[in-house]
């Protein structure tokens, strides 16, 4: 399997606006949004590539990409170009007459010249904004054994949630027979009326199949130039397109069947809170599948007794390096690097990004505080929805989001 990895070109789509994650995406691309106390969202896809043996990776960027490019430079400059290895950022080249990317397929169509220059036999197309762990080598193995033109990673989800995805059906040999992008009434799985089989947006193409499909799609006047809406349905009609069941993955990842599209504030919040479960549904602690990131050099986290005698305490929380808790109480929260918590502050069910300072006596409940925010003493956030709504974005389920560098 390792020998064939040189035949693989990996393309990570990392140019989406992520508008439903506002204000966290007001100044950064969605894949660069911090997650889990020390990571960025794109770290999970890149880690999967690293452990799966993928060494030729193009990251297609577009909107507000500075933070993402800086993170890739600082944390992911790990491959050796002399061995043909690379993680290369590809911003829009404006080769299509000065236009921005207009869809997932259009982003790759604009960079067809990179496919033509590549010796790859297969192209893996991934999203840079999902949280999951997966061994792509196992999917590639099935793709080659099936002599497939396209293989789509899929999983089953509750039928009422399936309309947010591409819904597919396959036969006993995993050959895909139907595909419908975001249907209003998703079709159920055979024998299980309550669940539907959906695409995860993870594709392995035979390179020539991808090239011809993109060129054909580019000339269609009414196409939205999207894989799910346009490319895949046409290929299913005339090519061998297979499904790969993510939850039956036989790779080296401990099988947790965890995959999240953290496209909204609420889904992002829940995925962070998942990490605080007694047995988290996604295992960050598998020794041979460590999630890589850029980590600045800070001292270990610590608690301190305040001048009033209060002990800094953490209960069921994730605490990153550089955190100093001087007499505050943190419960069921994710605290990122270099956060300072002062006397009698209470933080519950919340996510704090890097370089946040929480003043004496503050009360934070059900909130996300973005980077570089200094919260004045005795401020309350998450306790009075009417007052919070005057200043901050509040999600559908009531999560209050304080934007980066907010001035009180």
Image (spheres, rainbow, N blue to C red):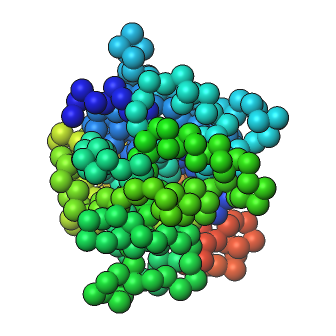
State the image coordinates of residue 32 (x, y, percent, origin top left): 54, 43
Question: In the depicted view, which residue is nearer to us: 252 or 118?
Answer: 118
Direction from residue 320 to residue 375 in the image, left or right: right
Residue at position x 34%, y 26% in the image: 6
Direction from residue 268 to residue 106 in the image, left or right: right
Question: In the depicted view, which residue is nearer to us: 383 or 192?
Answer: 192
Residue at position x 50%, y 44% in the image: 209
Residue at position x 60%, y 63% in the image: 229
State the image coordinates of residue 156 (x, y, percent, origin top left): 35, 73
In which quadrant of the rendered view does residue 137 lie? top left
In which quadrant of the rendered view does residue 116 lie? top right
- Quadrant occupied by the C terminus: bottom right
290 versus 185 height, above or below:
above
- Quadrant occupied by the N terminus: top left
Residue at position x 58%, y 56% in the image: 231
Question: In the depicted view, which residue is nearer to us: 160 or 275?
Answer: 160
């Amino acid at each position: 399997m390792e020998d064939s990895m040189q035949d693989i070109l990996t393309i990570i789509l990392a140019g989406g606006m992520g508008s439903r994650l506002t204000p966290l995406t007001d100044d950064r691309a969605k894949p660069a949004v911090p997650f889990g106390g020390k990571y960025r969202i794109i770290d999970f896809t890149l880690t999967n590539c690293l452990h799966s043996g993928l060494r030729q990776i193009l990251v297609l960027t577009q909107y507000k990409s500075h933070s993402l490019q800086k993170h890739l430079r600082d944390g992911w400059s790990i491959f050796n170009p002399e061995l043909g290895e690379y993680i290369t950022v590809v911003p829009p080249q404006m080769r299509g007459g000065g236009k921005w990317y207009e869809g997932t397929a259009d982003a790759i169509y604009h960079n067809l010249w990179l496919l033509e220059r590549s010796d790859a036999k297969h192209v893996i197309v991934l999203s840079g904004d999902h949280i999951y762990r997966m061994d792509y080598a196992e999917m590639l193995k099935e793709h080659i054994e099936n002599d497939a033109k396209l293989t789509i990673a899929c999983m089953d989800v509750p039928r009422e949630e399936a309309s947010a995805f591409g819904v597919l059906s396959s036969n006993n040999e995993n050959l895909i027979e139907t595909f419908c992008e975001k249907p209003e009434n998703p079709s159920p799985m055979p024998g299980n009326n309550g669940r539907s089989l959906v695409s995860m947006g993870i594709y392995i193409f035979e390179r020539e199949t991808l090239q011809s499909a993109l060129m054909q799609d580019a000339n269609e006047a009414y196409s939205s130039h999207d894989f799910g809406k346009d490319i895949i349905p046409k290929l299913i009609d005339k090519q061998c397109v297979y499904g790969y069941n993510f939850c039956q993955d036989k790779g080296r990842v401990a099988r947790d069947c965890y995959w999240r599209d953290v496209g909204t504030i609420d889904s992002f919040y829940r995925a962070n809170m998942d990490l605080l479960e007694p047995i988290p549904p996604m295992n960050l602690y598998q020794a041979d599948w460590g999630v890589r990131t850029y980590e600045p050099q800070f001292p270990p986290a610590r608690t301190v007794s305040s001048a009033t005698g209060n002990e800094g305490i953490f209960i069921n929380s994730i605490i990153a390096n550089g955190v100093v808790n001087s007499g505050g109480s943190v419960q069921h929260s994710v605290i990122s690097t270099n956060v300072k918590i002062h006397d009698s502050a209470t933080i519950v069910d919340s996510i704090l990004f890097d370089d946040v300072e929480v003043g004496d006596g503050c009360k934070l409940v059900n909130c996300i505080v973005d980077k570089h925010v200094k919260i004045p003493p005795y401020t309350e956030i998450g306790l009075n929805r009417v007052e919070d709504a005057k200043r901050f974005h509040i999600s559908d389920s009531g999560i209050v989001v304080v934007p980066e560098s907010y001035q009180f």
